[in-house]
Image (spheres, grey):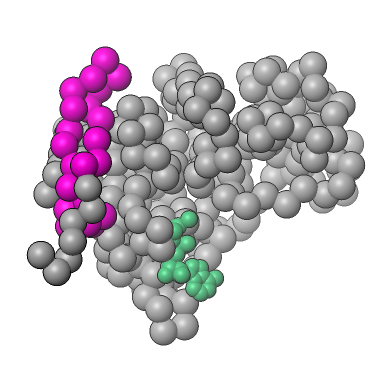
Amino acid sequence: MGVSAIATQLEVRNLTIAYGSITALASINLVVAPGEWLSIIGPNGSGKSTLLKLMARLLSPQIGTILLDGREIHSQPTKVVAQKLAMLPQQQTIPAGLTVRQLASLGRSPHQAWWQWELDRAGNAKVEAALKQVQMLDKCDRPVQQLSGGERQRAFLALALAQDARILLLDEPTTYLDLRYQLELLELLKHLNQEQKLTLITVLHEINLAARYSSRLALLDRGHLWAVGTTAEVLTPANFAEVFGLDVVTLETPVGLQICPLSAINASC
Ligand code: ADP
Ligand code: MG
């Protein structure tokens, strides 16, 4: 590879998917480099979760391909993909009685043979390290269902970390958390991104948090990739007017560029 080549970890090429007659995504092209933090933003129903599910191989596109480390993701075995990429879905179902440690241990299944029920020493060490990273060691015997929203997200994050993947996909991980827990979770993700060089792809509803933490933003509008780039490139009043129908001002703050919505733009004006 030449010195000028930009490394690509995940690449979305000409991706199109429809649910019945609804085109959820149309001709999406996107490149994610190792170690970056890309946030996908856009109004409700613009295709954010669909894009993340395609990247996690939970859905198949009608047209287009997704390459993971240069290989087509949909033609690789689940286990191989799961060793490289972990997904924290928007809605999580939790089996009754499952403890935090048992949940985190599920992250080891892509690394185990089907007949291995018990984790080996290395597997146990990975689970232990993941629980420690999310500061859940002291609550590891608690049933996940009894945890607060913030603790629950950390428990699921432990599962993803135990999986030992280099890419984490997270769909609205902060949605049901209050502001303090939102910041704590995002600071934890920032630490993983900076210290362990994990690649993060997040769907974040809260634009100002996306702006504050991500290295790049991808803005979706009704299934189209409207803009992709740095915060300054994407969070412009013109983009907000077009995509969200909002009149906004951008403000330079101690945590970088932030958006202040002023009013909804009346379409009939
Ligand atoms: P977002 O995450 O940005 O809110 P989604 O990716 O969930 O958007 O949805 C994009 C579009 O696809 C929406 O119009 C939504 O109604 C539709 N859609 C999503 N999932 C399904 C599904 N399982 N069946 C039918 N339509 C769906
Ligand atoms: Mg969604």
Q: Which residues are magenta?
A: 240-262
- Towards the viewer: 117 or 266: 266
Which of these two is toward me, 66 or 253?
253
Position above or below: 220 against 17:
above
Residue 181, position as x, y percentages in the image = 56, 26
Q: Is residue 189 visible?
A: no
**Residue 31 drawn above or below residue 99:** below
- Residue 97 lies in the magenta stretch: no
**Left or right of 83 in this view: 267:** left
| Position above or below: 160 against 183 | below
Q: Within the magenta stretch, is there residue 247?
A: yes
Q: Is residue 232 left or right of residue 82?
A: left
Q: Is residue 110 left or right of residue 200?
A: right
Residue 128, compared with residue 46, is above or below; it is above
Give the main secondary structure of the magenta stretch. strand
* Residue shown at the point (74%, 27%) measured from the top left: 127
Whether residue 254 is visible, yes or no, is yes
Percent across and percent down for residue 266 are 18, 61
User: Looking at the image, which residue is at 42% across and 20% down?
Assistant: 194
